[in-house]
């Protein structure tokens, strides 16, 4: 199953490839990093199972919303708007021929990126964090 989050401006696409994706602003523990003060350090989790996507808020300060409604947990359907605090995405689900690494599109260019930085003890160093996807909501 192809699962993607498309920014509300349509300039960025994030492919969800893992069964569990942690969303927040701490790159040491989050798979999808959104560096905004409105995002909690560990904000929410997206799970992918049996062709479905689910979201669960992890007690974030500014909440997780699906179609404008604050949720603690819920299923995501194609076309739903998913917001982490004020950062909004459109949910895209569809069939895929092959699963691959997470892909982030920036306007007319697309790049393959790792799904999370290595942790201490897994070859962690300051330079490896630079390869991790950092989402800037102001772009």
Image (cartoon, helix red, strand yellow):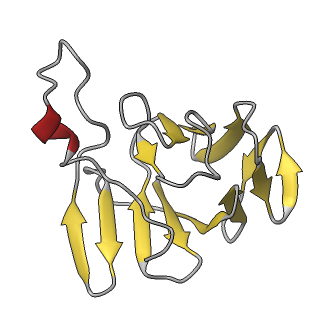
- The answer to which of 52 and 138 lies nearer the viewer is 138
x, y percentage for residue 51?
57, 46
| 31 up-or-down from 70: above or below | above
**Image point 15% across, 34% down: which residue?**
126
**Image point 36% across, 29% down: which residue?**
28
x, y percentage for residue 1?
46, 53
- The answer to which of 85 and 102 lies nearer the viewer is 85
**Image point 42% across, 28% down: which residue?**
29
Q: Residue furthest front?
A: 37
123 left or right of 40 in image? left
Where is residue 26, by image quadrant? Answer: top left
133 left or right of 66 in image? left
- The answer to which of 37 and 63 lies nearer the viewer is 37
131 left or right of 79 in image? left
Q: Residue furthest bottom?
A: 108
135 left or right of 125 in image? right
- The answer to which of 132 and 97 lies nearer the viewer is 132
Where is residue 114, by image quadrant? Answer: top left
Label tally: 0
x, y percentage for residue 113?
22, 53
């Amino acid at each position: 199953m192809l699962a993607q989050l498309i920014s509300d401006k349509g300039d960025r696409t994030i492919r969800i490839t893992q069964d569990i994706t942690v969303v927040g602003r701490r790159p040491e523990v989050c798979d999808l990093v959104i560096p905004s003060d409105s995002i909690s350090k560990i904000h929410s989790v997206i799970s992918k199972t049996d062709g479905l996507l689910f979201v669960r808020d992890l007690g974030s300060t500014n909440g997780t919303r699906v179609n404008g409604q604050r949720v603690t947990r819920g299923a995501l359907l194609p076309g739903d708007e998913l917001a982490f605090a004020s950062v909004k995405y459109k949910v895209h689900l569809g069939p895929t021929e092959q699963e691959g690494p997470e892909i982030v599109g920036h306007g007319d260019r697309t790049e393959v990126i790792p799904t999370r930085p290595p942790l201490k003890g897994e070859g962690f160093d300051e330079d490896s964090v630079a390869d991790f996807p950092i989402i800037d909501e102001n772009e």
